[in-house]
Image (cartoon, grey):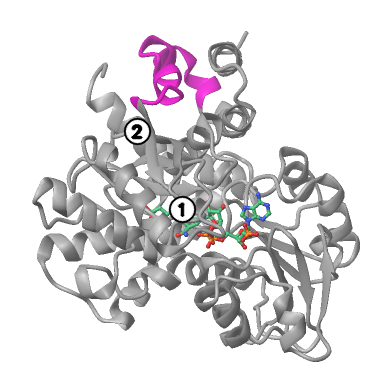
Amino acid sequence: MSYVSEVMERVIAKNPGEPEFHQAVKEVLDSLALVIDAHEDEFRKISLLERLTEPERIVSFRVPWVDDQGNVQVNKGYRVQFNSAIGPYKGGLRFHPSVNQSILKFLGFEQVFKNSLTGLPIGGGKGGSDFDPKGKSDREVMAFCQSFMTELCKYIGADQDVPAGDIGVGGREIGFLYGQYKRIKGLYEGVLTGKGLTYGGSLARTQATGYGLVYITEEMLKHAGQSLNGKTVVISGSGNVAIYATEKAQELGAKVVALNDSNGYIYDAEGIKLDVVKEIKEVRRGRIREYADAVAGSVYTEGKGIWNIACDVALPCATQNELNLEDAKKLISQGCTCVAEGANMPSTREATDYFLEKKILFMPGKAANAGGVATSALEMSQNSQRLSWSFEEVDEKLKNIMIGIYAKVSSAASRYGAEGNFVAGANIAGFEKVAEAMKAQGIV
Ligand code: NDP
Ligand code: 2IT
């Protein structure tokens, strides 16, 4: 059996009940077969793949807090410190009822390759909780965040592990988490990114994931002799990534016609009015259905179905496995020729394979959404220098990083005879730097 297949079997046997983790590892290992098979002995001798697929450390802890009725609630908290070969652990915190160890391990594993692709010195990690911020008062969210950080602060630090936001963790949560870290540790340091602008945050971090996604999409289209200008775009989600992807796509002349949340989707043939969405989601923390009440001519449909809307470009920006094979077939049958993933692993493996088989332009999440973490690394640099760069400076750096990622991904694919296969390209290019660093640092 090949080394890659052996390691895949080991991962399945040693990590039972973790389907998302298996899915993420399998996709990467399938791509790496192109690199590893020719030099199996070299990698086998140092058990490189066994080490790459085993997190350096997972911390899990109890998070007790008191709700507004005076009841004691208990949640699970985690931090997966996956790989520190190229820098301190870096990656977001997710607060969502679906969070479990499998989901955080898949996200931490993806983060290792994504962070490597940015070209910046950041290792991979992820954390979070099964806490659901939806419907909670600000005081309840603060109580939860303070309890979560009281445990987490023992394991993180500006040169050790630097968390940020993800689903359910935005500016409000980062503020509460930062306050508690500072209070306990007595350190005013860049231990979190996505901070507010008054206490060490970076301009353009809020926009970075969505803007970066659109920059790399435009770059991919450019190499195919096209551009976003005049294209019809469908974007899933209506959170941080979806909102700023919509903003930048519109700036580049695209017409974004749909957005969703976990309840349903809105369709606006005239193009989404983003100020209405921002008011609903960023100010009122409401539901996307409220858009249809506010904008005449738009339609709200309950449930799934956003991928049934015809478009040229699809940008899934909600969550893992939100786009399946049936959706992929529907998208392509209606003329979609370009998909770029704002979310982490939003396409199922079958959907990804279908996109590759049909040879549409397809950019996987670990390349396409790397602008968020890249700008987090820029926030870390500013904190270390005790300086703040202008919006334009950060945005320009972000754009160049995304163009650089496209070049790395596309050239790695070509080097291994998989021209246009950006899944293979991203996995291989991300792996090369991490593998090199792991080899140099010995058996650790
Ligand atoms: P937000 O919490 O701001 O928004 C998440 C959006 O996705 C909401 O519209 C939410 O709907 C929807 N969603 C979440 N879970 C589900 C689900 N199980 N089913 C259907 N819809 C769901 O998160 P972000 O925008 O920050 O994150 C979106 C994606 O982008 C995630 O995959 C995240 O990992 C990824 N990402 C985020 C980065 C960042 O910088 N924030 C960086 C790179 C990737 P509802 O409100 O109904 O739950
Ligand atoms: O998935 C991701 O890359 C993020 N949620 C952002 C991580 C970060 O450290 O900015």
Q: Quadrant of residue 236?
A: bottom right
Q: Is residue 314 left or right of residue 18?
A: right
* Label 1 CA crowd tier, 10 Å (few <14, some 14–19, many 20+): many
Q: Which residue is mark 2?
A: 81
Residue 106 lies, in percent from the top left, at 53, 35
Q: Compare residues 29 and 106 and report the one nearer the observer.
A: 106
Q: How many marks?
A: 2
Identified by mark 2, the residue type is Gln
Q: Specify the quadrant that holds the N terminus.
A: top right
Quadrant position of ligand 1: bottom right
Image location (x, y in percent) of residue 222: 60, 73
Judge whether 255 appears above or below 99 on screen.
below
The residues tagged by marks 2 and 1 sit, at their Cα atoms, a distance apart of 26 Å
The residue at 61%/33% (across/down) is 20
Left or right of 227, for residue 46: left
Q: Which mark is residue 408?
A: 1
The kind of residue tagged 1 is Lys
Can residue 61 be seen in this snapshot?
yes
Q: In the image, is 397 to the left or to the right of 282?
A: left
**Foreground: 361 or 7?**
7
Q: Residue at x 68, y 76 (%)?
A: 226
Task: Report the magenta stretch's main SS.
Answer: helix
> What's the mark number on residue 112?
none
Magenta range is 36-57
